[in-house]
Amino acid sequence: MSTRLNVDYWSSLYPVYTNYGEKYRDAMECTQLLDRAESLWNWKGLNRSIPFDDIAPIIEQVDFEEYVRCPQQNAVESLSSRLCDHEILNSGSLVTPAFLLHLAASEPDQYSVKFPIYDRRVWNAYVYLWGHRGKGDHLYTAASHSPSKYEDFCQKFSQACPDGKGREYERALFMFGGFIMDIPPKDETTRIEKVDEILEKQEQALSKTQQRADCVAVDIDGVYDAR
């Protein structure tokens, strides 16, 4: 299945935007899920403002190995319900349980494509790239609260992700999602027609440049020669 995205290009923007990658790498070196979660609890806002001390006892009690063997919908729905039962979650957001599933299913050198990181940026990238929003629609203000739609996202991620590049693919979706969400006007969610318009102009400009020049975005060899 096509990635529908230039993964190398969009993921290359990630370290320019943020040092999230370094923090993630360091935290994933921890062998215990509790330590990983604590190290990344304020990372990218995936904690949904839940104090770590409130959720730490639940993380220690839960058998995450059992959860990650389940289909994505069952896993995130069950974990979310458990967190709600303990009054850790008070909304339908799946971002935090999905994040814990990702940390449990991943290894330092193996990003889990079954349970990828899930937030509004990657969600909006997904719904745009897979055509779930059309003309007359807008992007979303938040990631879906539907466990079945979360599973659809996870399955498409797994199918489209280039082999061995789960981390890069998620970062590409993150950067692309942020890009299309930032398209003006700033006082409303982005219209799909506006995203189409901007991306078509970009593709045309890059295609024309590639045909008549030695570079696509920046003539870096020319820069070196000029020094």
Image: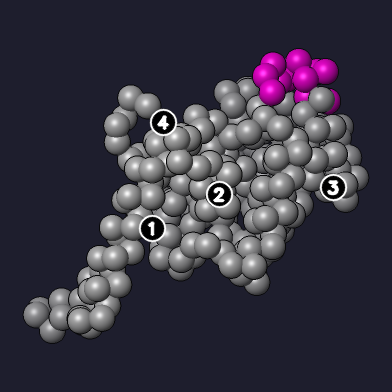
Q: Give residue 109's position: percent from left, percent from top.
A: 66, 65
User: What is the magenta segment's predominant secondary structure?
Assistant: loop
For residue 216: magenta?
Answer: no
SS for dot 4: loop
Classify residue 119 as left or right of residue 205. right
Q: Can see residue 44? A: no
- Residue at the image point whose x is 56% and y is 60% from the top: 169
Q: Quadrant of residue 37?
A: top right
Q: Which residue position is annotated with label 3?
A: 71
Q: Nearer the viewer, residue 155 or 220?
A: 155
Q: Secondary structure at mark 3?
A: loop
Q: Nearer the viewer, mark 2 or mark 1?
A: 2
Q: Residue at x 79, y 45 (%)?
A: 72
Q: Position of residue 48 (x, y in %)?
A: 59, 26
Nearer the N terminus, badge 3 or badge 4? 3
Residue appearing at x 59%, y 67% in the figure: 2
Q: Position of residue 221 (x, y in %)?
A: 21, 82
Q: Give the mark, 4 or 2, whose residue is nearer the N terminus.
A: 2
Amino acid under label 2? Gly
Side (left or right) of 15 relative to 149: left
> Is mark 4 in CB contact (under 8 Å) with mark 2?
no
Q: Nearer the viewer's eye, disc 4 or disc 2?
A: 2
Would you name the residue on which mark 2 appears? 131
Q: Which residues are magenta?
A: 82-92
Between the residue at mark 3 and the residue at mark 2, the CA separation in whole angstroms equals: 24 Å
**Between disc 1 and disc 4, whose residue precedes?**
1
